[in-house]
Image: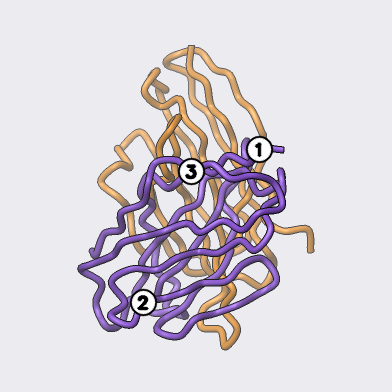
Chain colours: A orange, B purple
Amino acid sequence: DTGVSQDPRHKITKRGQNVTFRCDPISEHNRLYWYRQTLGQGPEFLTYFQNEAQLEKSRLLSDRFSAERPKGSFSTLEIQRTEQGDSAMYLCASIRVPSEENYGYTFGSGTRLTVV
Amino acid sequence: DAKTTQPNSMESNEEEPVHLPCNHSTISGTDYIHWYRQLPSQGPEYVIHGLTSNVNNRMASLAIAEDRKSSTLILHRATLRDAAVYYCILILGVRAGNMLTFGGGTRLMVKP
């Protein structure tokens, strides 16, 4: 397993367009998280899934944002009608719970979104 | 949620030890202390975690104060590859899978 993969690494889009990002977690990890990180700040939690169920959403996740994890494996994060304020790094992380050996969350390298 | 306080930045010389402090005076008895680091253009990376006792792994050591109101991440010999932002995070239960709440972290600069 090569860790958590995110695609694409970079995305430039025009304001008002829709974008979709994909995250492939570590295969045996049942929990998947999405975070957003703006320049100079720490990552902020957006939402997470336990298998295919979306269990929590941050108030940061406006109605233009939607996330899915249809088969409990990969996940997608879609942003509709993008705004310049959506420009950020979008990070995905996964973990298996419960686990007797919990070495923390594994993050992907992120997708950097630039809205012009 | 209990919060952590870290210096914004620190500098170190290569091959010298680095002590990164973290204050968490409102920590509760069930909060674990986690450290992550984020290298440039990468996602955060797990470093170490602990509850009450000091912990060592291949990456670093974690020293936890007796009253648990502070902790220190120790890099025994800093290398240029250790230049990163280091985040100290409190999380309820090491196996709970709860979300991480990141602060601003400490930007570590390593000089050759």
Label 1: which residue?
B111
Identified by mark 3, the residue type is Met
Question: Is disc 2 on the same chain as disc 3?
Answer: yes
Q: Residue at x 41, y 81 (%)?
A: B51
Q: Nearer the N terminus, badge 3 or badge 1? A: 3
Q: In which chain is the residue bearing label 1?
A: B
Residue A85: image location, x then y, percent: 36, 23
Contact between marks 3 and 1 (CB within 8 A): the answer is no
Query: Residue most toward the left?
Result: B26
Cα distance between the residues tagged 1 and 2: 29 Å
Identified by mark 2, the residue type is Ala
Query: Residue most toward the bottom?
Result: A100
Q: Secondary structure at mark 1?
A: strand
Question: Is disc 2 on the same chain as disc 1?
Answer: yes
Q: Is residue B23 above or below residue A64?
A: below
Q: Residue at x 33, y 42 (%)?
A: A61
Q: Nearer the N terminus, badge 1 or badge 2? A: 2
Label 2: which residue?
B65
Cα distance between the residues tagged 3 and 2: 21 Å
Which corner quadrant holds the C terminus of chain B?
top right
Task: From the viewer's side, name the closer residue of A24 and B93.
Answer: B93
Relative horizontal placement of residue A35, taking residue A1 as reference (left or right)? left
Q: Which mark is residue B10?
A: 3
Q: Residue at x 62, y 43 (%)?
A: B83
- For label 2, the crowd category at 10 Å Cα-Cα, with few meaning under 14, some 14 to 19 and many 20 or more, is some
Residue A57: image location, x then y, percent: 33, 53
Identified by mark 1, the residue type is Lys
Q: Secondary structure at mark 2?
A: loop
